[in-house]
Each structure stands twice: as structure tokens, then as C-alpha cells.
Image: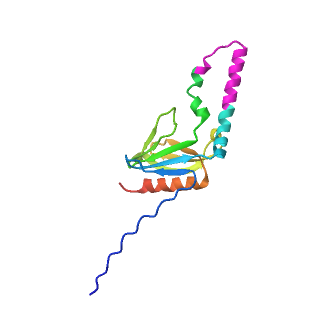
Amino acid sequence: MTLTQPEPSLPEPEIVPPAGIQLEHPASGGVRVRLQLGAGNRALLAVPRLALLAAAVGVLLQAWRHHVYIGFWLFGVPFLPWVLGSGVSTLLIGERALEVEARHSFGRTLTLPRSRISRIEVNRAGLLHSMQRALYVHTTEGQTARLLVGLNAAQAEFVHEGLQRWLASDD
């Protein structure tokens, strides 16, 4: 009779993210995915914003010229962070929810419960985002959230695969 030694459990392979993605494990649990956009992607994302800013300045100058004084500053202040854009986007993948920690909807954190997410896909964003690659999260209520605009192909594949595994995993 021979005794066989149980095979030692193999350690999980270390996940190596592509360039521009940092993974953190906060004490509160979950995984924080931090995306640092490259200069080229930030420049492409800034083109529509700068065009809209130039149009707003043009309208403001025409209003001043024709002595039509409207509180443009009141409307412009909340849009300043949007015009400036953000080079960093952050997702916190928790046990039961996905949180977007970057500037979204004027500083609010967007939280998507895992039970409400029907599918996650990578697609192109609209013209206001220079048709850059983005992550789309579709909810069971028919809403769609556009996340991490400006991903390159390797980053999109890495984040999409990880979120698909998270979505498919059992609690």
C-alpha cells in the first residue's frame, strides 16, 4: 500500500496588468483599478471639449459685444471640470458593487450594484469623446453607463475580462 502525498495547491498566478493600469487592494476589500490615460488619448479626448469651450467663449464675446449680459459664469462653473477633463479614472470592484470613483456627474460617485448589471462590453464612445474605446455597463433596467473612456486595446481587454469574471463569479 502506498501513500500518496496530496499535491500542494498551486499559487494563483500573479496578475500583470498592461501599461497604464494599476491594481490596488484597499483594506475595505475589493480591487481598485486605476487607469492612467496616455498623453495622446488625453489630447484626443480634449479636442471636442476645447471646441465646445471655444464656441462658448465665442457666444460670450458676441453677447458682450451686443450688450446682452447673461450669467454665463453661472452655467460655466459646473462644466469647468468637464472641460479640463481627467487623466485618471478609477473603478472600485467590490464584492457586491462596481463604483466609479473618478469625476462623474459633477463629482458624484457612480455605484452600480452587481445584481443590476446585465452585461459589460467594450465599444466606441460618441463624438464628444472622439470615438475612443470605452467600457459600457448595461443594467437590467435598460440604462447604460459609459466608463473608462480612452482605453487602448490591451487595457480594454484586461479590464473587460476581469469584470466578466467578477460578474460571473458566485457570491
Q: Residue furthest left?
A: 1
Residue 75's place in the image compared with 37, above or below, is above
Residue 62's place in the image compared with 137, above or below, is above
162 vs 102, nearest the viewer: 102
* Residue 131 visible at all: no
**Which span of residues is magenta-colored?**
52-73
Residue 83's place in the image compared with 163, above or below, is above
Residue beneath the point at 43% across and 54% down: 166
Q: Is residue 61 left or right of residue 120?
A: right
Residue beneath the point at 51% across and 36% down: 104
Q: Is residue 47 left or right of residue 80?
A: right
User: Is the N terminus in the top left, top right, bottom left or bottom right quadrant?
Assistant: bottom left
User: Is the C terminus in the top left, top right, bottom left or bottom right quadrant?
Assistant: bottom left
Q: Give the percent coordinates (x, y) of residue 155.
A: 57, 53
168 vs 19, nearest the viewer: 19
Q: Within the magenta stretch, is there residue 1?
A: no
44 vs 24, nearest the viewer: 24
Q: Residue furthest bottom?
A: 1
Q: Give the percent coordinates (x, y) of residue 34.
A: 51, 47
Q: Give the percent coordinates (x, y) of residue 17.
A: 53, 56
Q: Main secondary structure of the magenta part?
A: helix
